[in-house]
């Protein structure tokens, strides 16, 4: 009888003795039950669902990859599904974790990655305590009794939280405790949680962008200082869209709508801050300042709420406009200045003001509270104002190098660029003269030369082309369609 090869012998041992950890044919280590993973640099594969009590998979070495392969760890409400203590370089991916105290728990662990995991029906979905520079991407935390993702103080800084979903949790969806700083929070969805969607605590230099927080008690809590909240969608929250408890904040380009109050600043908060480019609409109250808000500027925002602004102190000490500057404003006009002050019934100041020189700025100031005014309130965008805005955008894009003529021969490319501007200039003259059908014909031709469809060939190229096409289509819709 020939001696068995070592690999065959190992497989037999695994089969006969039902060993928990066995190497598979690809040289990874397979897991069939709860274990301590202790081989540094190794890949461990979960090959079946596991039901247990207490801690299940304990990461006992650095640089380990734990691949759940879509399998489930099911607990009895105690322990952690996956537990790391003082580990670095670990990846946990594609694992379902249910019914533990903590679904996944990283303690004093840094530079680890959690990817594509689902942690549900635990006390807390994912907890990270005393660790930094961890990456959480495309995880789902739902129906946990407490927080979905919890960065526990102190020292939970320099983390990347990207593309995660936190829903229907009993407390906050994504929570950064005090002194958690320099975190990047982008592309996450935190909806239908009992408390906050996203809470950034008292840390500083956190960056939150392109997140969605809806139908929570409060959408966003922004504390600390020098934090940035940009291009988020914050809608339908029961009380506040954004609650401000910090200062030196940058709140830009967010959509804040259908909350009870859009933005609420607590006493002595929001000083030295900038609010710009936000659409704050269909809330009961748009912005509420409880205390004095000095050295804070709000400009180029779109307000359209039952009550756009309310302040406990009058005046609150804020500035409501910047200097008049050429540039496309939030309603398509050619100048930056103040804010658009609308009302759902169409009778807001900006919707009814006079703009005699068609610069997109109301001819009179808008008094917000006694002693405080927006001196350059934006006007409702008429076709003439929108057309002027397009001309300003076109010329600025050419100057900045983001818009140029199409063609391999420079002379031909320049000719196409000049022809496009001439087309727009004539359309502008027709609008000013009231010759709407002629203007519409030119606008439609211009849009066909910027829409990226290939036929007919676009006359212009560059980063600014999609925005130019959008502006042309918007103006065409306003001016030309019945």
Image: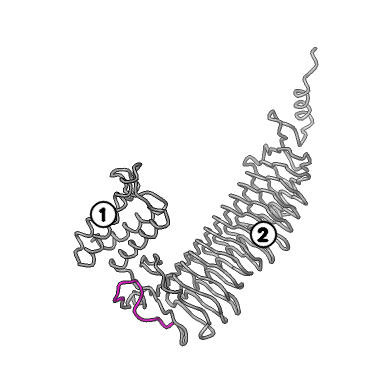
- The x and y percentages for residue 240 are 53, 71
Give the residue at mark 2.
150
Label 2 Cα neighbours within 10 Å, binned few <14 / some 14-19 / many ≥20? many
Bounds of the magenta span?
Answer: 355-367
Q: Nearer the viewer, residue 38 or 390?
A: 390
Residue 453 seen in the current view: yes
User: Split into 4 quadrants, where in the image is the C terminus?
Assistant: bottom left
Which residue shows up at 28% across the image and 63% down it?
Answer: 478
Q: Nearer the viewer, residue 223 or 330?
A: 330
Q: Quadrant of residue 245?
A: bottom right
Disc ID at residue 444: 1
- The x and y percentages for residue 192 are 55, 61
Label 1 Cα neighbours within 10 Å, binned few <14 / some 14-19 / many ≥20? some
Is residue 454 positioned above or below 325 on the image? above
- The x and y percentages for residue 244 are 58, 72
Looking at the rendered image, the disc whose residue lies closer to the viewer, 1 or 2, is 1
Which residue shows up at 69% across the image and 66% down it?
Answer: 178
Predominant secondary structure, magenta span:
loop
Q: Quadrant of residue 166?
A: bottom right
Q: Nearer the viewer, residue 168 or 400?
A: 400
Which residue shows up at 51% across the image and 74% down it?
Answer: 297
SS of the residue under disc 2: strand
Is residue 437 positioned above or below 12 on the image? below
Is residue 253 positioned above or below 245 on the image? above
Q: Nearer the viewer, residue 160 or 374?
A: 374
Looking at this view, name the residue that lies furthest to the top.
1
């Amino acid at each position: 009888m020939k001696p068995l090869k070592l690999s065959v012998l190992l497989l037999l041992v695994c089969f006969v003795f039902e060993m928990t950890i066995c190497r598979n044919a690809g040289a990874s280590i397979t897991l069939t039950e709860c274990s301590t993973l202790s081989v540094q640099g190794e890949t461990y594969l979960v090959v079946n669902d596991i039901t247990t009590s207490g801690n299940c998979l304990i990461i006992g070495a650095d640089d380990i990859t734990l691949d759940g392969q879509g399998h489930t760890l099911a607990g009895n409400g105690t322990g952690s599904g996956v537990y790391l203590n003082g580990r670095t370089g670990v990846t946990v991916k594609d694992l379902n974790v249910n019914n533990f105290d903590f679904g996944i728990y990283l303690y004093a662990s840094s530079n680890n990655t959690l990817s594509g995991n689902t942690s549900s029906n635990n006390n807390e979905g994912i907890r990270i305590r005393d660790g930094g520079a961890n990456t959480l991407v495309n995880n789902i935390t739902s129906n946990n009794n407490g927080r979905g993702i919890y960065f526990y103080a102190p020292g939970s800084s320099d983390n990347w939280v990207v593309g995660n979903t936190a829903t229907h949790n009993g407390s906050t969806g994504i929570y950064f405790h005090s002194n958690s700083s320099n975190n990047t929070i982008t592309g996450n969805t935190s909806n239908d949680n009992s408390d906050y969607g996203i809470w950034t605590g008292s840390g500083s230099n956190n960056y939150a962008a392109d997140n969605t927080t809806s139908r929570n008690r409060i959408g966003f809590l922004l504390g600390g200082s020098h934090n940035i909240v940009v291009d988020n969608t914050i809608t339908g929250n029961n009380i506040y869209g954004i609650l401000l408890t910090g200062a030196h904040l940058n709140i830009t380009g967010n959509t804040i709508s259908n909350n009870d109050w859009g933005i609420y600043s607590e006493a002595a908060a929001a000083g030295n801050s900038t609010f710009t480019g936000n659409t704050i609409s269909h809330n009961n109250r748009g912005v509420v300042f409880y205390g004095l808000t000095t050295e804070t500027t709000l400009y180029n925002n779109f307000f359209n709420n039952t009550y756009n602004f309310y302040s406990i102190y009058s005046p609150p000490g804020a500035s409501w406009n910047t200097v008049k500057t050429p540039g496309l404003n939030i309603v398509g006009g050619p100048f930056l200045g103040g804010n658009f002050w609308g009302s759902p019934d169409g009778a807001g100041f900006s919707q009814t003001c006079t703009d005699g020189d068609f610069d997109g700025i109301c001819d009179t100031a808008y008094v917000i509270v006694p002693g405080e005014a927006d001196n350059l309130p934006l006007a409702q965008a008429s076709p003439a104002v929108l057309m002027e805005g397009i001309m300003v955008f076109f010329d600025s894009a050419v100057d900045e190098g983001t818009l140029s003529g199409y063609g391999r021969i420079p002379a031909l490319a320049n000719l196409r660029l000049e022809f496009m501007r001439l087309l727009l200039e004539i359309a502008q003259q027709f609008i000013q003269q009231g010759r709407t059908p002629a203007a519409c014909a030119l606008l439609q031709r211009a849009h066909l030369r910027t829409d990226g469809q290939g036929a007919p060939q676009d006359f212009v190229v560059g980063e600014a082309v999609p925005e130019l096409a959008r502006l042309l289509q918007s103006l065409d819709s306003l001016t030309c369609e019945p």
